[in-house]
C-alpha cells in the first residue's frame, strides 16, 4: 500500500503482519472467488482497451499496490498480444513489507519492490502502464486522489488503469446516510466515495486523457467498482533512466466502455 496524510485513509493497518497474513481469506471462499474473477475479467478488458488506444502492446506493467500478490497468476498467464508466448514484465510495488512477504510466499513470479505510492521510486516514463487496484477507496479527499493519479501518470509512458468505488449505488447511498448520522453525533463516519462524474473528472484533472470506463459488474449503478482507463500525459516521451538502476529510481528497496 502507500502513504497518506493524516486522516486521509487507513493504510497503516496493512503494515500489520496479522492483517497481511489473513488478507487473502476474502478471496478464498466461493463469493470471493467470483469477485476476484470479475475483477480479472474487467482488468483484461481494460488492458486490451488501452493497448488498442495506444496501438501497441503493454510490455512493462507496474502493479501498485500489489498487496499480497492477488494478481500474480493473472500476470503470469497474460501474454503480449503480438509477442507470442512472451509475457509482459511486471513489477509489483507496495508500501507494506508484510504484504510483500506474503506475495513472495505465493505464486508471484515477478520482481517486487517496497515503495510509497505518493512518491513512486521510479523514473518518469519507466513503465508502459500503472495498474492501481483497491487503493483509491481508502483516500478521503479529492485533492489527495488527484495527487496520487499525477504520480502514477508521471511514471507511466502509456497510460494508467485505476479502480474507483463510486457512490451512486444503493451501497454508496447507505454510506452517505451513515455519514450524516455519524456527523450528527460528532463522529467521523465512513469514507464517502465520489460520484461517477467526479471520478472521471479527477482522472482528467491529473492531466490524463480518458480512454474508457470498464464496469467490474453490470449494470454500473448496481456494482460500485469501475476501472478507469486513461492515457498518460507522458505518452510518446522517452523514459529518463536512472544512473544505475534501470527503470527503478535511486530510493527503491527491492525485496471499456466509452466515458
Image (cartoon, rainbow, N blue to C red):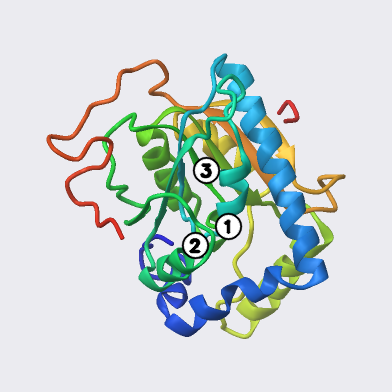
Q: Is residue 191 above or below residue 160?
A: below
The extreme left residue here reads 243
Q: At x 30% / y 18%, what residue is drawn? A: 238
Q: Quadrant of the C terminus?
A: top right
Q: Quadrant of the N terminus?
A: bottom left
Q: Earlier in the sequence, mark 1 or mark 2?
A: 2
Where on the picture, by quarter, is residue 30?
A: bottom right
Where does the image place residue 165, in percent across and percent down from the top left?
Answer: 66, 54
Report how far apart the C-alphas of labels 1 and 3 lie in the structure. Answer: 10 Å
Q: Nearer the viewer, residue 253 or 157?
A: 253
Circle 2 crowding by C-alpha within 10 Å: few under 14, some 14–19, many from 20: many
Horizontal arrangement in the rendering, residue 218 relative to residue 64 (left or right): right
Report how far apart the C-alphas of labels 3 and 2 lie in the structure. Answer: 12 Å
Q: At x 77% / y 51%, what residue is drawn? A: 38
Where does the image place residue 164, in percent across and percent down from the top left?
Answer: 63, 49
Q: Which residue is mark 3?
A: 131
Q: Is residue 80 above or below residue 147?
A: above
Horizontal arrangement in the rendering, residue 82 relative to residue 32 (left or right): left
Q: Which residue is mark 1?
A: 134
Circle 3 crowding by C-alpha within 10 Å: few under 14, some 14–19, many from 20: many
Where does the image place residue 13, in percent across and percent down from the top left?
Answer: 46, 77
Of circles 1 and 2, the one toward us is: 2
Q: Which residue is mark 2?
A: 67
Q: Nearer the viewer, residue 246 or 85?
A: 85
Q: Earlier in the sequence, mark 3 or mark 2?
A: 2
- What is the secondary structure assignment of the residue under circle 1? loop
Give residue 183's mark.
none
User: Is the Cβ of the residue at disc 1 closer than 8 Å to that at disc 2?
Assistant: yes
- What is the secondary structure assignment of the residue under circle 3? strand
Amino acid at each position: 500500500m502507500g502513504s497518506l496524510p493524516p486522516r486521509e485513509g487507513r493504510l497503516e493497518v496493512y503494515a500489520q503482519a496479522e492483517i497481511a497474513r489473513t488478507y487473502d481469506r476474502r478471496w478464498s471462499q466461493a463469493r470471493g472467488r467470483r469477485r476476484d474473477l470479475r475483477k480479472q475479467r474487467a482488468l483484461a478488458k481494460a488492458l486490451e482497451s488501452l493497448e488498442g488506444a495506444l496501438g501497441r502492446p503493454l510490455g512493462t506493467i507496474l502493479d501498485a499496490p500489489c498487496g499480497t500478490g492477488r494478481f500474480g497468476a493473472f500476470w503470469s498467464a497474460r501474454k503480449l498480444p503480438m509477442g507470442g508466448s512472451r509475457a509482459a514484465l511486471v513489477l509489483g510495488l507496495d508500501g507494506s513489507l508484510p504484504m510483500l512477504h506474503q506475495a513472495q510466499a505465493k505464486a508471484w513470479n515477478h520482481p517486487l519492490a517496497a515503495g510509497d505510492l505518493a512518491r513512486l521510486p521510479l523514473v518518469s516514463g519507466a513503465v508502459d502502464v500503472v495498474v492501481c487496484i483497491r487503493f483509491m477507496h481508502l483516500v478521503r479527499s479529492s485533492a489527495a486522489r488527484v495527487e496520487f493519479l499525477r504520480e502514477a501518470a508521471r511514471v507511466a509512458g502509456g497510460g494508467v488503469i485505476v479502480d474507483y468505488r463510486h457512490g451512486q449505488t444503493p451501497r454508496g447511498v447507505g454510506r452517505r446516510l451513515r455519514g450524516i448520522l455519524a456527523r450528527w453525533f460528532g463522529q467521523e463516519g465512513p469514507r464517502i466515495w465520489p460520484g461517477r462524474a467526479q471520478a472521471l473528472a479527477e482522472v482528467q484533472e491529473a492531466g490524463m486523457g480518458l480512454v474508457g470506463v470498464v464496469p467490474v459488474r453490470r449494470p454500473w449503478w448496481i456494482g460500485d467498482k469501475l476501472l478507469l482507463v486513461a492515457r498518460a500525459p507522458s505518452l510518446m516521451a522517452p523514459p529518463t533512466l536512472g544512473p544505475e538502476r534501470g527503470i527503478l529510481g535511486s530510493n527503491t528497496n527491492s525485496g471499456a466502455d466509452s466515458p
